Image (spheres, grey):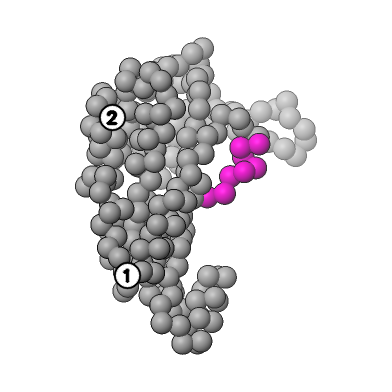
């Protein structure tokens, strides 16, 4: 809302160009209609256009097709070159690693990382998610048992463990996944989370954002910022 107010104030002040820098575009995952729901991302794009924005700089949209929702140019930058550089410089034995896609839907992006790093690729493929009806009758879910040892008036469902898990996780140690480090970009502030968990490492992407702002201001080409980007990124 603050961005809309500032953009509208600039519009009423007869600004020639109003460029919004939104590293993490909100509601980007709500870009498809599910049942009779609304496409919130399309609504947000219309609101930004009505407020007066003429250009947007963002990073790693959930779907690249979201750029078609806007009636003005959108520069969807990528953080993959910074992440690949971090892997090559900060992980000494990264050549013995394997790029893992969490689902078949993420296989294309994981393949682009694996090809540029010249590593192997693995895809996690588990059981299909059950529908709402299946969730109601519990055919594909473990039975719920009410815990009677809690305080009066507080009842939480206790999930019974399945006899055999559907996925065998590589790197599973004693029933727990050993996470050494989590690498994220600073498109979203997470200073508090870093204080709580020392395993979080931040990759700074302010350089590419500042270069994009400079190029747009000077009327230069933006193609240089997409030189190391693949189609699946």
Q: How many other residues sit within 10 Å of disc 2, few (<14), some (14-19) or many (≥20)?
A: some
**Quadrant in which the N terminus is drawn:** bottom right
Residue 114 drawn at (x, y percent): 27, 30
- The quarter of the picture where residue 123 lies is top left
Distance Cα–Cα, label 2 vs label 1: 34 Å
User: Within the magenta stretch, is there residue 231?
Assistant: no
Q: For this view, does 115 lie left or right of residue 212?
A: left
Compared to residue 76, the image places residue 52 above or below, namely: below
Residue at 66 percent of width and 36 percent of height? 195
Badge number at residue 117 = 2
Q: In the rendered structure, which segment of residues is drawn in magenta?
A: 188-195
SS for callout 2:
helix
Frontmost of labels 2 and 1 is 1
Main SS category, magenta section: helix
Q: Nearer the viewer, residue 138 or 60?
A: 60
Q: For this view, does 104 lie left or right of residue 142?
A: left
Q: How many other residues sit within 10 Å of disc 1, few (<14), some (14-19) or many (≥20)?
A: few
Residue 37 drawn at (x, y percent): 39, 62
Q: Nearer the viewer, residue 10 or 212?
A: 212
- Name the residue at the right extreme: 152
Badge number at residue 219 = 1
């Amino acid at each position: 809302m603050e961005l809309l107010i500032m953009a509208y104030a600039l519009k009423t002040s007869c600004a020639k160009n109003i460029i919004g820098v939104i590293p993490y575009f909100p509601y980007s995952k709500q870009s498809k209609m599910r049942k009779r729901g609304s496409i919130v991302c399309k609504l947000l794009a219309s609101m930004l256009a009505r407020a007066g924005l003429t250009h947007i700089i963002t990073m790693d949209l959930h779907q690249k097709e979201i750029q078609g929702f806007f009636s003005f140019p959108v520069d969807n930058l990528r953080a993959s070159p910074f992440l690949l550089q971090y892997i090559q410089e900060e992980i000494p034995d990264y050549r013995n690693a394997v790029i893992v896609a969490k689902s078949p839907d993420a296989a294309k992006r994981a393949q682009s990382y694996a090809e540029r790093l010249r590593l192997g690729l693995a895809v996690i493929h588990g059981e299909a998610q059950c529908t709402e009806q299946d969730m109601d009758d519990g055919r594909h879910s473990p039975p719920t048992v009410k815990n009677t040892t809690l305080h009066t008036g507080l009842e939480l469902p206790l999930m019974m463990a399945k006899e055999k898990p559907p996925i065998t996780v590589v790197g599973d140690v004693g029933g727990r996944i050993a996470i050494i480090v989590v690498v994220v970009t600073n498109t979203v502030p997470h200073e508090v989370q870093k204080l709580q968990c020392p395993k979080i490492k931040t990759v700074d992407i302010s350089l590419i954002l500042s270069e994009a702002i400079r190029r747009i201001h000077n009327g230069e080409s933006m193609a240089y910022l997409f030189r190391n980007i693949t189609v699946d990124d």
